[in-house]
Amino acid sequence: MDTHVPEMLRQDLRPDPVLPHFPAGAGVILIGMAGAGKSTVGKALAQRLNWACADTDHIIEAHYGVVLQRIADTLSKDEFLDLECRVVLELRLSRTVLATGGSVVYRERAMRHLSSLGPLVYLDVSLPVILERIARKPDRGLAIAPGQTVEDLFLEREELYRRYADISLPVGEMTPEECAEAIVARLGEIR
């Protein structure tokens, strides 16, 4: 934690009223496939906790001044993954819900850093739902190799999400607000 924070702001890092046993200054990191709802659930969770909300895809877009899909189309998959990792490694967050890009799980350094910022919550959404959501928004910036399908990505990443997750949340038919409540309940169990 930054030791140069003015005292009047440091007192805001006292125990969180919603999560009194949650580590002061920690955040919550959402991981999962593109289309899992990380950005939408992230906003609902941040509102529920009265925390900030950030999205690594938006941070990358802001840094480069273009939409994520253009960046993904311009770079090779490995170049994109390296760029995403560099951006993640620069993050210093406190009491923030962070929605990550679905490909962040490919870089172990990025995942170790994210884990140091707070618990990793995997939004577990079925492949048919992911396919339907991606079809509705095909410009979402998938890091996909030539010849690879969304199904290939799903199968490849699912094991990684489960490996890194502190909490796995089967989303099913839950609304973003219901997901937020379920996450708060699970976070309340963390000591």
Image (cartoon, rainbow, N blue to C red):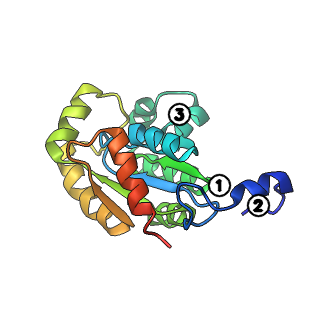
**Badge 3 density bin: few <14, some 14–19, many ≥20, Cα 10 Å:** some
Secondary structure beneath dot 3 equals: helix
How far is disc 1 from disc 3 in space, using C-alphas? 18 Å
> Based on the displayed image, in which of its 4 quarters is residue 185 positioned?
bottom left
Q: In this orientation, which residue lies closer to the viewer: 13 or 57?
A: 13
**Badge 2 density bin: few <14, some 14–19, many ≥20, Cα 10 Å:** few
**Residue under the point 25% across and 64% down:** 159
Q: Earlier in the sequence, mark 2 or mark 1?
A: 2
Give the residue number, with chain letter if any, for mark 2.
2
How far is disc 2 from disc 1 in space, using C-alphas? 9 Å
Q: Where's the N terminus, which quadrant?
A: bottom right
Give, as a three-letter code, the residue at label 3: Glu
The picture places residue 169, in percent across and down from the top left corner, at 30, 56
Above or below: residue 156 compared with residue 72: below
Which label sits in the foreground, 3 or 2? 2
The picture places residue 56, in percent across and down from the top left corner, at 51, 44
In the picture, the disc for residue 61 is 3
Q: Are marks 2 and 1 in contact (CB under 8 Å)?
A: yes
In the picture, the disc for residue 92 is 1
In the picture, the disc for residue 139 is none
Q: Is residue 143 visible?
A: no
Q: Earlier in the sequence, mark 3 or mark 2?
A: 2
Above or below: residue 41 compared with residue 2: above
In the picture, measured across the screen, residue 182 lies left or right of residue 155, that is: right
The picture places residue 191, in percent across and down from the top left corner, at 50, 73
Secondary structure beneath dot 1 equals: loop
Q: Earlier in the sequence, mark 1 or mark 3?
A: 3
